[in-house]
Amino acid sequence: MLHLDKAEIAALLPWPALVEALRAMFVAGCQAPLRHRHPLPADGTLLLMPATNATHSGVKIVHVAPGNAARGLPAVHAAYLLSDAVTGAPIALLDGGELTDRRTAAASVLAARYLARPEARRLLVLGSGKVAAALAEAYAASFPLAEIAIWSRNGIHAETLAARLCAHGLPAHAMPEPDPAGFDIVSAATLSTVPLIHGAALTPGTHLDLVGAFRADMRETDGAALARALCVVDTRAGGLAEAGDVVQAIAEGHITAEDLAADLAELCRGRHPGRTSEEQITLFKSVGWAGEDLAAAVLATSRARSC
């Protein structure tokens, strides 16, 4: 059985290939129920995310421990087990954190292919963690970016991430406020429970990419932002059950479930055109789909074997 660590997964999952693998999985589909949640001590959570198709099965095991910051440890630990769907034989054990970070960013870029303007040059990233870094890198590999602004509640963290991106040749700088005005793409990867992005501040033509609010009690935008936008979710089941931005906007009366124009599979299958004008505000809300993990694990394993 293969064992793939963080560095190996990053090398095996270049952005163009990973985005294409996710697109193919959204087109083909797979069996992937909503994540299973189990409480753990000290407000921790165990998440199980299984997925199967005709050839492979996989499950991601995630431990979320909010108190780990005080222990000097990452808040999230994850592992992914990929198996043969027919025989059940294990194929590979992969670092779940790196797999998640990269497939999350790749899903956002995949959606942006349909929802953002192709000539987008200004990106604002809210957040300064691993997912925020992956988002900046993935967008830079897919759009002709001339500016990457980083905002974080902790200004030092924003400065640190911007410096790291600059060291890799990306045009990044820290930003003191999460002001979306004038940006072509605004990508949020935070743990906020209050709106950071307000609909009234959005410039026509902006694409909003909302990654961070993965529970119904979390949100990164106000309801007015969703009311102004063409709204797309990664999956309707996940969006309506777990996406705080969507759930709370519906509860407040800003939108209804019918205002979700499409899910990502419908975009990939050509059942919805995505953006239809230069001035349109678009919004993609993801909470994570286990099919993305399966696609990424299969791609990484295949490439590892070929090497």
Image: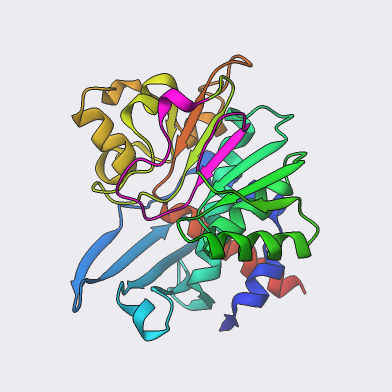
As drawn, the residue found furthest toward the front would be: 176
| The residue stretch that appears in magenta | 178-202
Q: Nearer the viewer, residue 207 or 194?
A: 194
Q: Is residue 250 left or right of residue 274?
A: left
Residue visible at 37% across and 71% down?
62
Residue 199 in magenta stretch: yes
Residue visible at 60% across and 76% down?
6
In percent of width and height, residue 304 lies at: 69, 73
In percent of width and height, residue 173 lies at: 68, 52
Residue visible at 52% across and 63% down?
129
In percent of width and height, residue 61 lies at: 37, 72
Residue 194 in magenta stretch: yes
Quarter of the figure with the C terminus: bottom right
In percent of width and height, residue 99 lies at: 54, 66
Q: Nearer the viewer, residue 38 or 205?
A: 205
Q: Is residue 10 left or right of residue 168?
A: left
Q: Main secondary structure of the magenta part?
A: loop
Q: Is residue 299 above or below residue 80?
A: above
Question: How many discs mark residues in the rendered view?
Answer: 0
